[in-house]
Structure formats: structure tokens, C-alpha cells
Image: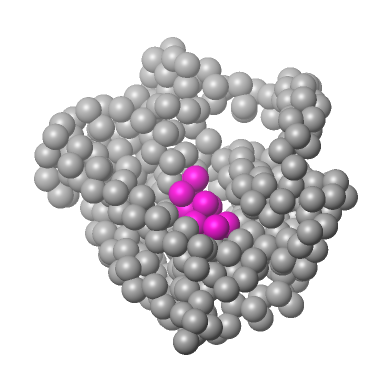
Amino acid sequence: MDTPLLIVTLVLVVFGLIMMFSASYANAWYMFGDSYYYIKRQLIFAVIGLMAMLVISRINYHVLHKLAWIFYVVSIVLLIVTLFMPPINNSRRWIIIPGVTTFQPSELAKFAIILLFSHIASVKNEKMKEFKYGFLQPIILIGIIAAIMLQQTHLSGTILIILVGSVLMVIAGTKLRWFGIAGAIAVPLGVAFIFLSEKMEYAMSRINMWIDPFQDRTGDGHQIIQSLLAIGSGGIMGLGLGNSRQKHLYVPEPQNDFIFSIICEELGFVGALFIIILFLFFIFRGFAVAMKAPDKFGALLAIGITCQIGIQTFMNIAVVSGTIPNTGISLPFFSQGGTSLAMLLAEMGVLLSVSRFSSIKKL
């Protein structure tokens, strides 16, 4: 097993729980009269996720071959179910389990795409250089999930799945010129879809607020403005753990997508840089596992999971800092979301399984 990968994962989980509590306790008190409301739920799912990680890490990852299509179909069914659920924050992304929790199927869909593409590429192997297997089939598989997620107005999840899927396709042998041809066709169609779709107003408002959030400083631009104020207030060393001002009802739901701004405010540039270094080291170890994997299936699984977390982290920090439009994407291991954390840790189990059985094969 890759011990450095395990250690950095545990550090991210513990650090994430500390910062999630620090960012959430004020909002939890104002909303529910219980400062521990969010952290209690997060801790439960962290324990569940860590147990799943340890169990999965000891199971030979090759058993996932047989489950690839099952994961994909189940994720599609669950995504469709969300469209009939009551909206939460004006989006239908969650399956509500009354009295228990909510579940976001897009988290499962991310792994389902990684697993299925790894399975197909390892089975088809050289056929991935052919248009049918290397491009057409994967594009259709991504397209089905992406189309459903767009109906949820889950733009960030859609972009993430497309990017991770594209990386896996290229590594598996898909020719780059097919992406160029597809892009020349897809971009005009995508723009036309946005302008003709009822989702146009939603998408355009996000872009307008990114260009100039001060045009609606008390409305849609409020969140990014308060986020930038939090980042700027932190300076080099920060205000100190727990001392954020912006989390007191200035940054909306500071424990969610914009938790990185609270981290910057409390821990400053030094703390933010430390977290970025942790993620970079995680990515380095993830690719190291992929390089040492005994077969193509294991290598692609490792690359897919690593890219998912790496791209998601980059997108979250870019959104919080105003570098790209707000897409509503969480920071892995840090943002509040029990099922998301549990799913991430389960994926870490798969990554550790690849590293474990790589070592066993060498012996």
C-alpha cells in the first residue's frame, strides 16, 4: 500500500473536518440553534467513509470489472430520480431520504464514468484507437449523464465529468484530432442550446456576475464579493483559526462551496498555500500509483480518481477567487456534504487497492 498517499488522505480528512467546523458553527447556530449541527453529520459520514476506504483497499480492484456497467446504469437511474425530487437551493440534485439524509447521485456518477471508461479501455485495448470504440462510444456514455445533469442545472458536475472522461479517453488511446472535430461541432451547438434553452437565464446570470459582481452586490454578486473580502482579510498569516468575520452570515453557507475563502481568512496565505501543497502532493502520489499499476485497468482507475480530485480542487479555488464563473463546485474533503465525503473516501479505497495489489504482484 502507498503509505504516503494514505497519510496525506488522512491529513486532508482531519484538516477538512477542523475547517468545516470552524466555517460552519456560526451558521449552524443561527440556522438550527446548534453549533455542532453540521460537524456531527460530517463526522458520521467521515467514519463511514474511512471504514469503507479501509475495507475497499483490501479488496482486489479487479472485481470492479464486473460492476462497471451496473454502477453506470444505477447512477443514471438515480440521476433521473432527482428530477422528480423537491428542489434544494433551486436545484434538483439530491435524493431526499426523509429523516435521514440527502444523497447526491452525481457523486456516484463521477466514479461510474471513471470505472466504466477504465473497464472499456482495458477490455478493448488497441481498439480504442478506432473511432467507434475510442471516441463514439465514450462520447455517448458521457453525453447521457451530462444531459441529465444539465437538467439539474449542475454545470460544475457536468464539466468535471466531461474533463475527467476526456483525460481517460486520451490516455486510453483516443486520437486527439477527433476531439478537434467534435469541438468544432459541439461548441456552436452548445452556444445555441444555451441561448435557446430555458436554462439560458441561469447560465448568463452566472457569467454576468463573474464579469462584474458589483452590478448586483446585494443579490447574485453578494457571494463572490464576500468571498473576495474574506480572502483579502486573511493577509499573510490570517486572523486565526475560528476568527473569521465573513462566516457570520456574510458569505452564504460558508461551509459549502466557498469554504476555501474562510480558510484564507482564518489561516491566511500560508494556510491556503499549505492546503494547496497537500493537494499537489496527493495528486503526485495518485499518479505514482498509476505509474506502478500492474495493468491498464488499475492505471486508468488511479488516473481517473486523481484527476477528478485534482480538477475539482482547481475549479473550486478558481471559483472562490473569482478566476472562473461560479459553477457550484465543492472543495474535496473540506466542503460540507456527508455523502460526498463518504464517496470520496470509498474512491480512496480503490486507489489504495491499486497500490496494494501493485506491491503484491511485484513480490
Drawn side of residue 99 relative to residue 68, left or right: left
Q: Is residue 99 above or below residue 187?
A: below
The image position of residue 260, as x and y in percent, is 32, 42
Could you tell me which residue is drawn at 15 percent across and 49 percent down?
A: 241
**Dividing the picture into quarters, in which one does residue 122 lie?**
bottom right
Residue 94 position (above or below residue 166): below
Q: Residue furthest toward the front?
A: 362
Quarter-of-image position of residue 40: bottom left
- Quick check: 249 left or right of 59? left
Whether residue 30 sits left or right of residue 191 in the image: it is left
Magenta-colored span: 303-312
Question: Quarter holding the N terminus?
Answer: bottom left
Q: Which of the colour schemes (rainbow, by chain, secondary structure, one colour) is used?
A: one colour
Q: Nearer the viewer, residue 165 or 289?
A: 289
Magenta stretch: includes residue 311: yes
Above or below: residue 107 compared with residue 317: below
Q: Main secondary structure of the magenta part?
A: helix
* Numbered-mark total: 0
